[in-house]
Every structure is written in structure tokens, then in C-alpha cells.
Image: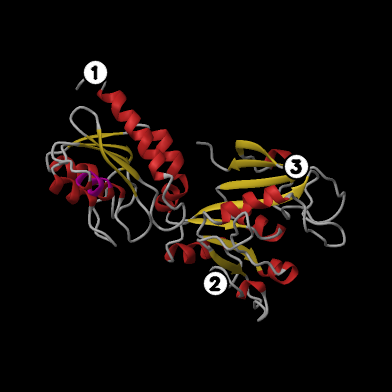
Amino acid sequence: MRPDQGEVERAAMARALDLARRGPAHGPNPRVGAVVLGATGQVLGEGWHRGAGTAHAEVAALEATLAAGHDPRGATMVVTLEPCRHTGRTGPCTEALVAAGVARVVHAVADPSPLAGGGAAALRAAGVDVTAGVLEPEGRALLRPWLAAVRRGRPWVTLKTASTLDGRVAAADGSSRWITSQAARRRAHALRAEVDAIVVGTGTVLADDPALTARDDHGDLAAHQPLRVVAGDRPVPDGARLRGPGGDLVQIGGHDPAALLAELASREVRHVLVEGGPTVAATFLRAGVVDEVHAYLAPAFLGAGPSAVADLGVASIADALRLHVTDVERIGADVLVVARTEED
């Protein structure tokens, strides 16, 4: 190994992570980036996965290498996720790498999928040199919801709340628009455009008539619209905004978060955003299926009105559900606190 090879490959992995971020955060497949390096460490080609049914990052990088007039034989493939060995919408990346004559593969994160995982072992069996774990923490951070969803067999759940400093989501008269600023609402819409599904309860549908769409800064529908999921047994009114333009409307009866998430997993949903009212928030928290919370706090007091979360059955401060804060950000006049239920 040349003295600088590790440094060159780490720099290429950082670039591959940047490329991966160009891919869609939503959808059943992970965001993956790849860089092909020549014998002296020069970049021969780059690629990233653009969404389900398109070429995987490794294949895209190989195609870019060939299009630039370079021969990938003997090259090093630097990729953010272990190459797959599974035939799905596209063929196995392991076979494409072997066929191209790639001599070395460097990846950040192992693939936990029982179908697609094991690519490193397949490559080694074919005589390819493989190094794993380069910039692994950064790779895991990028893929966190997808990795968790694949490992657990259920979607990653983000709970979003918007409340005053005293935890109220509406005034005593029921009015709730708007607690947070326009800047905070823009950020919330940006998150909607990244998830696969938004979940609310029938109570929120009947009380607020939400559209549950993802909109851009101009107020137009974003390119990606998540599924609009209603939990509960009461019907969605015929004239509801949920039946207007936006993502498909799915109603799942009952009030069991585990059953709802199982149904969404069968639809290849990887990331769910729970935006329901206090009752739905408490139901998901009590079920222990919330992975992350995005809590928007507006600098205001109401003193009365419903709280952000209904009764959790906590009788003592010792039994409080404590989270691990990962980020605090000022957005316009408001503050966004991001916290997870499990520590990294």
C-alpha cells in the first residue's frame, strides 16, 4: 500500500458521501455514492443512485468511467454502502464489478439486508480486495433511517410537534394556526418531501382538514409527495383536502402503531413522519416505536389548551421518557430541537 493510499481513499469516500446526498432520501433504496480511482489515485468516474429502478451507484460510476474513455480494469471502487449481491429491479453490483475487472473495493457501511448483504464476501471469493469501514460513522449517519428500517423490518419513525414554550398545540378555543413561523413551516415541508409517508389520526382529519402535502418555497407541490396515511376507523369525508392533489391516501383501521407500521413496511415504506395530534403522538410514544422527535418551539405562552402529547402513563419524574438531543437550531423566530429515543 502506498503511504498515501488510505488518505486518498478517505478523500474519495468523502466525495462519495457528497454524491450520495444528491439521491432521493425517500423510497425503498438507500442513498449511495461511488467514486472510481485509477492506479495513481486519480478519479476515473463518479456516480450515485438516483432512485428505485435506476442504476446503482457503482454501475453509474463504471458507466461514467467508460464514457470518459477510461478502463476500469485494475481500478479501485470507493462506495458508501457494501455492494449488493441481489437481483431486484437491477442486477447485482458485485457481478458488475467483477465483470468490469475492478481490483479493489472500499466501502463505508455493511449492508444489513438479508437479500442484498454479503457482497463483500462474494467479491473476496472472486479475488477482489475489499476494505470495509472507511468513514463508517459518516456513512451510518447518512443512512440512519434506511439502516434502521432494514434491520428492524419496520419504518423509521419521526414524530413532529409544534408547540408554544409551555407545550400547547392550540389555544383554549381550539385555534392553532399558526403557532410557528413561516420559516419553521418551510422546514417542516422540506422534511415531508424526504419521507415516504405522513401519519395522522382521524381526529386531526376531522378537526383540521389537513392536506398533508409537501410544498416548496413558492407554495407549489414538491416533486415527491409522501403517502397520506390516516390511522383510525372513522371515514375520511368525501370533501376532505386529503382527497385533493398530493400523495396517495391510505386509511389503516384501528389504533395499533405496530400494525400500522407493518402495513407500511409491506409497501416498502422506510421513513414515516407522524404529524397527528396529542393522542396519536402519545400512542406512538407509548408503543415505543418513535425513533426521532422534531419539536418546534414558538416563543409564546398560552397557559391553557391541549398539550403536544397526551397522557403517557408517567406517574413519577423517575419514569419520564428521556431522549438524547442531537441538534438545536434557531429557525426564524422559533427553535427546532431534534432528539432521538436511542443514543448513537
Q: Earlier in the sequence, mark 2 or mark 3?
A: 2
How many C-alpha atoms fall within 10 Å of the one at disc 1: few (<14), some, or many (≥20)?
Answer: few
Q: Amino acid at mark 2?
A: Val
Q: Position of residue 57 (x, y in %)?
A: 31, 48
Does label 2 or label 1 sit earlier along the sequence? 1
At label 3, which amino acid type do we have?
Answer: Ala
On the image, numbered disc 1 is attached to which residue? 3
Q: Is residue 27 left or right of residue 112?
A: right
Q: Is residue 288 visible?
A: no
Percent across and percent down for residue 90 are 26, 59
> Which one is in front, 225 or 45?
45
Q: Which mark is residue 250?
A: 2
- Counting residues from the start of the chain, the first of labels 1 and 3 encountered is 1
- Is 302 or 210 nearer to us in this picture? 210
- Outermost residue to the top: 3
Residue 217 in the image, given as x and y percentages of width and height: 62, 54
Hey, what amino acid is under mark 1? Pro
Q: Say whether residue 64 is magenta.
A: yes
Mark identifier at residue 333:
3
On the image, which quarter does residue 265 sit in? bottom left
Q: Secondary structure at mark 1?
A: loop
Q: Are marks 2 and 3 in contact (CB under 8 Å)?
A: no
Residue 172 located left or right of residue 185 = right
Q: CA distance from mark 1 to mark 3?
A: 50 Å
Q: Is residue 26 above or below residue 260?
A: above
Above or below, 122 against 43 in this view is below
Q: What segment carries the magenta color?
A: 61-66
